[in-house]
Amino acid sequence: MQVCVNIENNKWKKYKIDFEKIANAAISAVYKDSEVSITLVDDKQIHKLNKQYRGIDKPTNVLSFELGDDLLLGDIFISLDTVMREAKDANISVEEHTAHMIVHGILHLQGYDHLNDKEAKVMENKEIRILKNLGYKNPYAEEDVVCNSESCCPGSFITKLKSIKIQGFWIYLLSVFLGAITAFGFAPFHLWLLSVLGIGGMYYLTIIQKNKINFWKSWLFAFPFGATYGTVMFWWVLNSIYVIPELARQFAVWTLPGLIGIALICGIILSVPFAVIRYVSRKTAQRAVLFATIWTLVLWGREWFLTGFPWNPLSNILINVPMVANSMSLWGAIGLTFVIVGLISSFVELITNKTDKSCKFIFAIYIILFVVGCVFGYRNMKISDNYNIDNMPLIRIVQPAQSAVYKMPTSKQEAQEIAKQKIRDLFVWATNDKSAVPDIIVFPETAYPYTVVDDDFPLSHILNSKVIMGANHYKDGNLYNSMLIANEQGKIQHLYSKSHLVPFGEYRPFGDVIPTPGLLTPGNGPELISVKTNKNDFVFVPAICYEIVFSDSLVPRDTNPDAIVNITNDTWFGLTPGVYQHLDMVRRYAIESGLPVVRANYSGISAFVMPDGQVESYLSVAQTGSLDGYVWGKHITPYRTIGRDLWMIFILMFSIFVSISIHGFQKKD
């Protein structure tokens, strides 16, 4: 073990003490590669530390500050004035009593304590054996001159917290609890403080573990947190099984396997950041940066897993805090997530290791990043508030909001009658408001009850309006989930097909292993669509369903459309959290892109969302009707210019640079 001795009182120099030999005699094999700092002070200095960290207004003999790091084990402060007095009273040399203080302090850094008689006995016996091997007598033979209720270690809240031994079953139970509360930071609850406490608590639980284990055991340690966090956050996807009674009879058997599958996948993926820091030995401040970086990498990786599912980035817990949420205009959800996680981990390191200056340094760095983000957020809010609708079309959103549970037709004739009735209903809802004549009518995903096979679309001719609508499209033996754009003459002018398909719902990721209701073909990806109106050409980016959750994936480079038109069908999720979380994902994308969003939902939440993420107007869940509105405030954000992948590279470079700076900072210190 490496021992760094800092002499801050020159009177210590007269004593010949082999600090490294004594410290290594007290260290266990687990920490043989670690570092310990021993600072030699006087009563004035240790009095100040004792008052600051323990609230005890007098000097003491030795103070130990455990840093919770396998490499940088901790700091020990020894006061010569007190050691001299106690050595004189015990009739022993200063060198011998100092050796006892070093051994005592080193044992504290390894987790030994004397908060009760049982712990004190174990620690004293350990000290006696070590000192005997060094050639010193039993310091407790006559009188305890070292440790009493007011000496030796900082009695702060953190120190007392560390004394609580959480082992075995209780660790996993606490992990489950912390994972569960973390999910409540997202919609519809928006209890962001619970997410902060959940992640911070699990981070603390991880860093206080001292025993060395391999990576797979590290993963197993963190698995309960990730599994519970993901299951509480995503259980609602299985609600879709029960929407159609006929399908429910076929797929209900997959409910329990589905929950187990969600738990397994989320446990594997979402526990990675904790598993890494549990396994990799790093100094305290570096560990905080590593944790934030790995968490962000996991979010970035979720963009592609099973065609991608980056749902609920941690940034979304602050979507209702406008200035903070709008920092995503600078660095997107990926950057804000990095800042939030970094703030949490660095704060835990700071309160756990108060004397480590590098922890103060990295926490200050994250505070600066947070403030910079808020400044850009405020700027984005001001730019988005540019209310100019002179050349914008009046858009009408239609929300059918039919029952989430409906009967499938039993015959071709019944299917035709149902389809005709749906068309009549769509017409009624689209024309019910006579107070204004819309330029464009937007219907949600899968609203058209027929499969499109040519360019005929009679509904737009009947409505005498330009129509944007979701429909199934069949071509060359392939079935697509599409958005059609039709003119007043009843002709389809453009078809856009969904490229990000829902695994298990729209395609089979594992072949025929798990049955899937839909077998769709993906489209060709992002594009711009222009619709001519009486005022001007309305240029928009199409997005079907959850395509809008994919950061930096919709808007073609070097373009600046008027808006994003998102058609979706959240009927499958009823009144579950998924409906509200989906809207928050839309708000996030609006901020990142600097574009307003026209959102038509079949039976969820239809809305006009502005570029600052604020919902201008909306139709609530299960509300049938129409909503008229304009969009404004389009602009190109720094995030849209830089892009998600380049921001990930910036984050990695920043993390490496800061980690190197911390290492240099600690060596200098």
Image (cartoon, rainbow, N blue to C red):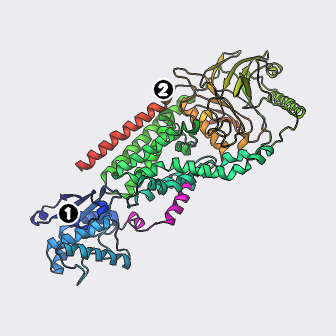
Nearer the observer, 254 or 482: 254
Residue placed most toward the observer, 530 or 46: 530
Q: Quadrant of residue 400?
A: top right
Instruction: Give the percent coordinates (x, y) of residue 333.
Output: 51, 38
Reply yes or no: does residue 235 show up in magenta: no
Residue under label 1, please give it.
41
- Three-letter amino acid code at the position of disc 2: Thr
Q: Quadrant of residue 161?
A: bottom left
**Position of 160 compared to 98: left or right?**
right
Give the labeled residue for mark 2. Answer: 641
Secondary structure mostly seen in the magenta stretch: helix
Residue 168 in magenta stretch:
yes
The residue at 13%/75% (across/down) is 93
The magenta region covers 156-179
The answer to whether 66 is drawn above or below residue 593 in the figure is: below
Residue 148 placement, left or right of 650? left
**Extreme-front residue of the structure:** 512
How many numbered marks, from 0 up? 2
Q: Amino acid at mark 1?
A: Val
Which badge, 1 or 2, comes first in the chain's sequence? 1
Question: Could you say where residue 157 lies in the image, as x and y percent from the top left?
Answer: 41, 65
Question: Can I make out residue 59 in this image?
Answer: no
Image coordinates of residue 45 in percent, x first then y, are: 23, 63
Residue at the spot x=27%, y=60% of the render?
A: 32
Q: Nearer the viewer, residue 102 or 273?
A: 273
Does the rendering let one see residue 373? Answer: yes
Which residue is situated farthest in the bottom direction here? 142
